[in-house]
Each structure stands twice: as structure tokens, then as C-alpha cells.
Image (cartoon, rainbow, N blue to C red):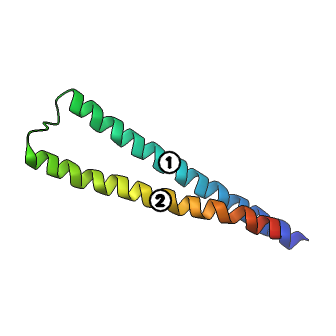
């Protein structure tokens, strides 16, 4: 009985960890997109400059890609953990 409680507590901690990762990746992604939009509206990013747009594309791909990978990975784990807890 005591071992099951420990396993549930560990799974609860893992659930919280993945929930924090998911919410943080969403916040970082939206903050980045809002920052890029504000920079475009204030003309700090010039849309006619192809070098700047290419750099922005690569940086955006990396930032959004990393956020997406963390988000999808944590969502995958968040779906599995409640089923494991129910089995205990």
C-alpha cells in the first residue's frame, strides 16, 4: 500500500512537470510571435529586406519548432499519466 502511494506521488510530480513544460512552451511561443508582430508594426523589422526576413524565418522556425516539440511531448505524457494512475 505504501509503495502505491509513492508511485502515485511520483506520477503526480511528473504530471505537474509536464504541465509546466506545456504551459511554458505556449507562453514562450506566443510571446515570441507577439514580439515579432510588434517589431513589424513599429518597422523595426523591414519586410523588404530579404536578408532580415531570411534570418527572421530561420530564428522563428527554431523558436516555434522547439516550443512545438516540447508542447507535443508534454501533451503526450499528460495523456498517459492519468491512465497509469488509474491502474495503480
Q: Please state the horizontal and vertical placement of residue 60, each as a whole percent of the image.
A: 28, 50
Which residue is labeled 2 in the image? 70
Which residue is the extreme one toward the right?
1
The residue shown at (31%, 36%) is 35
Which residue is labeled 1 in the image? 24
Q: Are marks 1 and 2 in contact (CB under 8 Å)?
A: yes
Name the quadrant containing residue 87: bottom right
The residue shown at (40%, 46%) is 29
In the rendered image of this protein, does residue 55 appear above or below residue 35? below
Q: Is 79 left, or right, of 59 in this rendering?
A: right
Residue in the foreground of this view, choosing between 85 and 9: 85
Query: Looking at the image, is mark 1 or mark 2 earlier in the sequence?
Result: 1
Name the quadrant containing residue 69: bottom left
The residue shown at (30%, 57%) is 62
Q: Please state the horizontal and vertical placement of residue 30, each as a whole percent of the image.
A: 41, 41
Within 10 Å of the Cα at label 2, are there few (<14), some (14-19), or many (20+) other Cα atoms? some
Within 10 Å of the Cα at label 1, are there few (<14), some (14-19), or many (20+) other Cα atoms? some
In the rendered image of this protein, does residue 62 appear above or below residue 32? below
Residue in the foreground of this view, choosing between 43 and 14: 43
Residue in the foreground of this view, choosing between 48 and 28: 48
Q: Is 43 left, or right, of 16 in this rendering?
A: left
Question: Tag 1, which secondary structure?
Answer: helix
Q: Which quadrant does the C terminus fall into?
A: bottom right
Q: Please state the horizontal and vertical placement of residue 52, each as a whole percent of the image.
A: 13, 46
Q: Please state the horizontal and vertical placement of residue 44, each as a whole percent of the image.
A: 17, 32
**Marks 1 and 2, how far apart in space?**
9 Å
Q: Which quadrant does the N terminus fall into?
A: bottom right
Q: Is 26 left, or right, of 40 in this rendering?
A: right
Question: Tag 2, which secondary structure?
Answer: helix
Which residue is the extreme one toward the front?
48
Amino acid at each position: 500500500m505504501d509503495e502505491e502511494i509513492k508511485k502515485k506521488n511520483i506520477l503526480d510530480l511528473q504530471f505537474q512537470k509536464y504541465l509546466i513544460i506545456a504551459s511554458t512552451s505556449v507562453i514562450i511561443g506566443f510571446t515570441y510571435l507577439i514580439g515579432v508582430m510588434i517589431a513589424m508594426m513599429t518597422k523595426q523589422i523591414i519586410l523588404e529586406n530579404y536578408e532580415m526576413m531570411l534570418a527572421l524565418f530561420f530564428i522563428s522556425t527554431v523558436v516555434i519548432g522547439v516550443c512545438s516539440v516540447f508542447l507535443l511531448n508534454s501533451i503526450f505524457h499528460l495523456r498517459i499519466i492519468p491512465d497509469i494512475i488509474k491502474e495503480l
